[in-house]
């Protein structure tokens, strides 16, 4: 327990000198602390468990009531998602290609998480106890250039490997686009249930994307700026978290790095990290759909004989020569058909 007269962000230790102490205020804090400890010692024994409360000005709300409201807010989204899945089943629209495409994107973001863990073990990020660092410290505002560049390079390698199976090889039909939306929303529903099971309060960051992105299949034929506006509005939840930390602790543009440091020190639990990476995979699939760069996972006949890494290197080399592997593959198939 910490008793302080400062705000959310403590002042710098360099400026914290004895001549700046307010003797009268310090005495009041000391007497209040003594009375508090005395009342705790004379009171009944505290129970092992504790209840959560949300303070709203001079009033407080029991935590279970807020959790119940957040969980109840999932019901409309889950109902609509199940209805979309049933519609695809009635129309015999296969979802396996959409789900495999999502799993491919999930593999890329899992690679990002593994790379971040690897750089943590190598000492690229500041280490310490699993506690929030002081926002005024150097570690909270200093971006380690070597670690950030290493994470970007490893992410580029993972993207080159994964993108080969995600590129469209032919025109995508309307049913396949609808299946892409259905697969992404089903994955989002699973993530919402996992969030509710692990920490219901965290639903406040994922609920905007649930209810806003649910409209994307309905407006898939509208103007591009309408679809992009709805897609961007789904990022309100994560932006709310980053903005809250940036404003409350006065971090500004260093707020994303502060969140990364909380992850590196182990303060953020592993289930929350895994759910967030899976949520980013859903966002990636929806971005591909709105940018008309989505394609279902290719079948064995549509895939090249090379693996993803070799095919990605060959594609880069072909782009420099002005030719494309898909064109070469089509030419070879046409030649075989003539023979």
Image (cartoon, grey):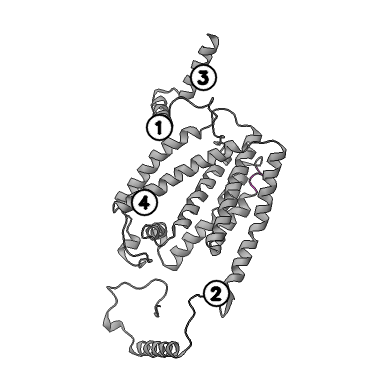
SS type, badge 4: helix
Could you tell which of marks 3 and 4 lies nearer the N-terminus?
4
Label 1, label 2: how far apart the Cα atoms are: 51 Å
Label 2, label 3: how far apart the Cα atoms are: 64 Å
Could you tell which of marks 4 and 2 lies nearer the N-terminus?
2
Is any atom of residue 320 visible in this view? Answer: yes
In the rendered view, would you say 304 is above or below 62? Answer: above
Question: Which residue occupies the foreground of this view, 121 or 291?
Answer: 121
Residue 161 lies left or right of residue 230; in this view the side is: left
Residue drawn at 60 percent across, 53 percent down: 210
**Mark 1 residue crowding within 10 angstroms, few (<14) / some (14–19) / many (20+):** some
Could you tell which of marks 2 and 3 lies nearer the N-terminus?
2
Is any atom of residue 218 visible in this view? Answer: no
State the image coordinates of residue 13 (x, y, percent, origin top left). Answer: 29, 73
Q: Which residue is mark 4?
A: 117
Q: Which residue is mark 2?
A: 53
Could you tell which of marks 4 and 1 lies nearer the N-terminus?
4
Badge number at residue 330: 3
Residue 221 lies left or right of residue 16; in this view the side is: right
Bounds of the magenta segment: 215-219
Label 4, label 2: how far apart the Cα atoms are: 34 Å
> Marks 3 and 1: which is nearer the front?
1
Badge number at residue 309: 1
Residue 220 lies left or right of residue 312; in this view the side is: right
SS type, badge 2: strand
Label 4, label 1: how far apart the Cα atoms are: 23 Å
Residue 290 inside the magenta-drawn segment: no
In the rendered view, would you say 221 is above or below 113? Answer: above
> Marks 2 and 3: which is nearer the front?
2
**Mark 3 residue crowding within 10 angstroms, few (<14) / some (14–19) / many (20+):** few
In the rendered view, would you say 155 is above or below 36? Answer: above
């Amino acid at each position: 327990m910490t008793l302080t007269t400062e705000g959310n962000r403590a002042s710098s230790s360099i400026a914290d000198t004895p001549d700046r102490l307010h003797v009268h205020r310090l005495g009041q804090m000391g007497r209040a602390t003594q009375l508090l400890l005395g009342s705790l010692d004379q009171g009944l024994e505290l129970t092992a468990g504790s209840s959560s409360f949300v303070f709203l000005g001079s009033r407080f709300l029991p935590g279970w009531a807020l959790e119940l409201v957040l969980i109840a807010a999932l019901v409309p989204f889950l109902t609509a998602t199940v209805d979309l899945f049933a519609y695809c089943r009635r129309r015999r629209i296969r979802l396996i290609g959409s789900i495999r495409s999502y799993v491919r994107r999930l593999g890329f973001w899992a690679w990002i998480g593994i790379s971040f863990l690897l750089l943590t073990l190598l000492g690229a990020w500041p280490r310490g106890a699993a506690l929030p660092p002081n926002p005024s410290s150097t570690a909270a505002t200093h971006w380690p250039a070597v670690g950030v560049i290493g994470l970007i390079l490893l992410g580029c390698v993972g993207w080159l490997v994964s993108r080969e199976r995600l590129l469209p090889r032919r025109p995508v039909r309307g049913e396949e686009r609808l299946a892409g939306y259905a697969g992404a929303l089903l994955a989002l529903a699973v993530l919402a249930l996992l969030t509710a099971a692990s920490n219901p309060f965290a639903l406040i960051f994922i609920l905007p994307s649930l209810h806003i992105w649910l409209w994307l299949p309905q407006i898939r034929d509208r103007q591009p700026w309408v679809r992009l506006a709805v897609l961007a509005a789904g990022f309100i939840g994560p932006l709310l978290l980053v903005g809250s930390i940036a404003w409350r602790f006065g971090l500004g543009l260093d707020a994303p790095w502060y969140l990364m440091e909380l992850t590196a020190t182990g303060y953020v639990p592993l289930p929350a990290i895994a759910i967030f990476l899976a949520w980013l995979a859903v966002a990636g699939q929806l971005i591909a759909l709105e940018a008309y760069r989505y394609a279902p996972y290719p079948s064995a006949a549509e895939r090249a004989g090379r693996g993803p890494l070799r095919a990605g290197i060959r594609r880069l080399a072909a782009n420099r020569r002005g030719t494309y592997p898909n064109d070469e593959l089509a030419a070879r198939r046409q030649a075989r058909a003539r023979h």
